[in-house]
Amino acid sequence: MKNIQELKEKLLNSKKVIITTHHKPDGDAIGSSLGLYHFLKNNYRHLKVVVVTPNDYAHFLQWLPGNDLVIDFEQKPEMTKQLVADADLIFCLDFNKLHRINKLGKEVGSSKAEKVLIDHHIEPDDFAKYKLSVVTASSTAELIYDFIKLLDANNKLSKDIATCLYVGIMTDTGSFRFDSVTPKVHEITADILRYNIAHDEIYNRVYNTFTENRLHFFGYCMQECLEYFPEYHTTLIAVDREALERYEISTGDTEGLVNYALAIEGTRFGALIVDRIVTIKMSFRSTCDFDVHEFAKKYFNGGGHQKAAGGNANTSLETEVRKFKELLPRVKDQIV
């Protein structure tokens, strides 16, 4: 971040700060947002800091310290609009384009507040005055850790901050198994662990809190919704809206499902396509040099990272599944 000194002055002279993150926040989005929230509250006590999300998020993240103070824009639109309009600074975490926060993007874009982007996604839009954008970072939580160090605060971390950042790093690295994990990631994690966080309990709260319905749903998806295409080293999971209704699937319940597409030996490209009623949502994963960000951007109105990306469409599940299958011969050489 080139203008860190200027941002330090801005923090000292501001009164109201908003922290926001992307649509349907995941562990990194909420972990980094609440981690930054606790840091600012601890070190800039004159600030009024509020975390705002575009909509709801998974129940297995709602135990994080500070969760009860998060404001959901969809639930409290007028309150949120006023808070955003009155802010001096708005921190934009874990997203690179304002449309990633849906209708909240219009409010953030028109606010007089100066924006701070902290993110690791490819090709960020130019809407923020201050930027910490590092596409090689494992997670936005890693960048929040770096940001805290850049500010040279006396009381850099606390148990609450460490807990939130650990969730962000753990979830966005696939529990430290993705190739985005570097020696630096482990060094940061080692420092975080010094704050006596219950890392085993954190893992259980995030990954081992399935409802019975959700576990049955995953089993159904493996049995009925999965297709393997050996000639393309590709696995697809396509889920219709009836399955979501039958198993009473709620926000966050499909989290991690796409990773099972990579579990078949030989799979290099995994995809999840879900009929979310209002839109068709896609998740793409790669274990080779195939760039799923470019694939999602070119064909499915999406993007993300080279090996993990998403997309969406306003058509039908059948249309998007057919399109996906028709694209496989075109990208075969990139996968195999």
Image: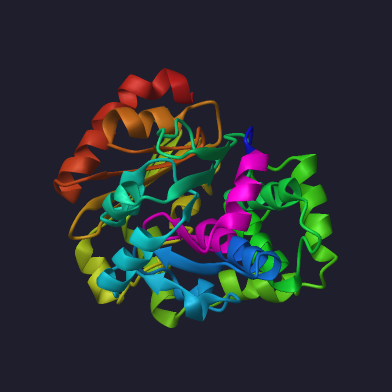
Residue 332, how many percent across, how many down? 40, 22
Picture quadrant of residue 190: bottom right
Residue 191 at least partly seen = yes
Find out whether residue 13 is within the magenta segment.
yes
Residue 137 at least partly seen = no
- If the image is split into quadrants, where does the N terminus sit? top right
Specify whether 307 is left or right of 146. Answer: left
Determine the residue located farthest toward the top in the rendered image. Answer: 333
Going 32% across and 59% down the picture, which residue do you hit?
Answer: 224
Residue 10, how many percent across, how many down? 58, 50
Residue 65, how many percent across, how many down? 60, 76
| Colour mapping | rainbow
Magenta part of the chain = 4-33
Going 47% across and 28% down the picture, which residue do you hit?
Answer: 291
Residue 51, how many percent across, how many down? 47, 66
Going 76% across and 64% down the picture, which residue do you hit?
Answer: 157
Determine the residue located farthest toward the front in the rendered image. Answer: 13
Could you say which is closer to the camera, residue 244 or residue 169?
Answer: 169
Residue 278 position (above or below residue 248): above
Could you say which is closer to the camera, residue 165 or residue 133?
Answer: 133
Find out whether residue 229 is within the magenta segment.
no
